[in-house]
């Protein structure tokens, strides 16, 4: 066999498509096609053609703010820890909440001792509030943050509060540490922010708990439109349970030994 015959035949378009999927899979945020083009150095025309095919085949999904992984991406069955896979799961859950409740949906997560905003899906009639103070500095004033603080152990909660000032963002913000701790201890299973973060806006959050995941799912609405009845809370809790189960199933699938390993 000649050296030329021994060389594998590589299809450039396949390599480029796989590169796009790899970038999206490892991105913590949705990626616009133009950004993918810039990252890879491909022309926009080439990138759009490849992305169109990947969307058609189910490996990518187009969202208003960029691309996320599609349901046919193989690692959906094996590794929920990858950032892009976690984001795609979250994005689908938030979209469901937004469509059902007509409210902007948010998900935050506790990781490495800090609270992080994972993703937001806007409702057309009730878009997101302006996040003028980051969640890492406003957990005490947001339903997203208070729900996560409720789920932490006593030591984790006290450690977090010892490292963060309780700034008074509005006249309704709970800025006293002892009062906040009492408020968290009396949680009814969900958290509410009534104009504590921003005047005119209210938010309600419920827990999302899965292996290696402590998070909160929330919606925001103008304060005069929020009616905290059993129906609203129940629908939000149902969505959170579905996401928790999905993330738990992903983690379980990822922890199963392969056939070769068990032989």
Image (tube, rainbow, N blue to C red):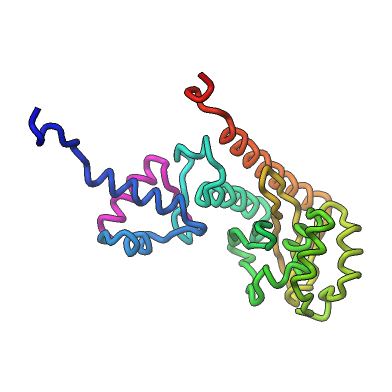
Q: Residue furthest top?
A: 263
Q: Position of residue 152 (x, y in %)?
A: 78, 55
Q: Disc count in the image? A: 0
Q: Position of residue 3 (x, y in %)?
A: 10, 35
Relative horizontal placement of residue 90, taking residue 19 as reference (left or right): right
Q: Quadrant of residue 238?
A: top right
At horizontal 62% and vertical 34% (from top left) the residue drawn is: 252
> Is 45 in the magenta?
yes
Quadrant containing the N terminus is top left
Residue 263 in view: yes
Q: Residue furthest left?
A: 2
At horizontal 51% and vertical 57% (from top left) the residue drawn is: 28
Residue 224 in view: no
At horizontal 77% and vertical 52% (from top left) the residue drawn is: 232
Relative horizontal placement of residue 157, taking residue 182 as reference (left or right): left
Relative horizontal placement of residue 89, taking residue 71 as reference (left or right): right
Q: Quadrant of residue 210?
A: top right
Q: Position of residue 102 (x, y in %)?
A: 65, 57
Q: Residue 179 or 164: which is nearer the viewer?
A: 164
Q: Main secondary structure of the magenta part?
A: helix
Q: Position of residue 119 (x, y in %)?
A: 59, 59
At horizontal 25% and vertical 55% (from top left) the residue drawn is: 46
Task: Work out whether 163 lies above or below 245.
Answer: below
> Is 220 in the magenta?
no
Q: Residue 52 or 136: which is nearer the viewer?
A: 136
Which span of residues is magenta-colored? Answer: 44-63
């Amino acid at each position: 066999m000649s050296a030329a015959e021994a060389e594998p035949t590589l299809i450039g378009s396949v390599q480029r498509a796989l590169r796009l999927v790899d970038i999206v899979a490892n991105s913590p945020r949705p990626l616009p096609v133009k950004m993918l083009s810039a990252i890879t150095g491909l022309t926009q025309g080439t990138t759009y053609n490849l992305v169109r095919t990947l969307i058609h085949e189910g490996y990518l999904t187009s969202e208003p703010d960029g691309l996320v992984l599609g349901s046919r991406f193989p690692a959906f069955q094996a590794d929920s820890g990858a950032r892009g896979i976690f984001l795609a799961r979250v994005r689908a859950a938030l979209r469901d909440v937004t469509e059902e409740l007509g409210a902007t949906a948010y998900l935050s997560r506790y990781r490495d001792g800090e609270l992080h905003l994972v993703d937001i899906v806007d409702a057309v009639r009730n878009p997101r509030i302006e996040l003028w103070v980051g969640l890492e500095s406003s957990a005490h004033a947001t339903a997203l943050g208070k729900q996560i603080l409720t789920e932490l152990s006593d030591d984790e909660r006290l450690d977090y509060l010892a490292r963060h000032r309780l700034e008074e963002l509005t006249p309704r913000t709970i800025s006293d540490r002892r009062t906040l701790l009492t408020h968290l201890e009396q949680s009814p299973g969900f958290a509410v922010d009534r104009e504590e973060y921003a005047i005119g806006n209210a938010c309600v959050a419920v827990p999302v708990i899965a292996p290696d995941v402590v998070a909160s799912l929330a919606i925001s609405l103008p304060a005069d439109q929020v009616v905290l009845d059993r129906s609203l809370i129940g629908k939000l809790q149902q969505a959170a349970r579905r996401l928790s189960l999905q993330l738990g199933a992903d983690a379980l699938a990822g922890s199963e030994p392969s056939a070769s390993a068990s032989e």
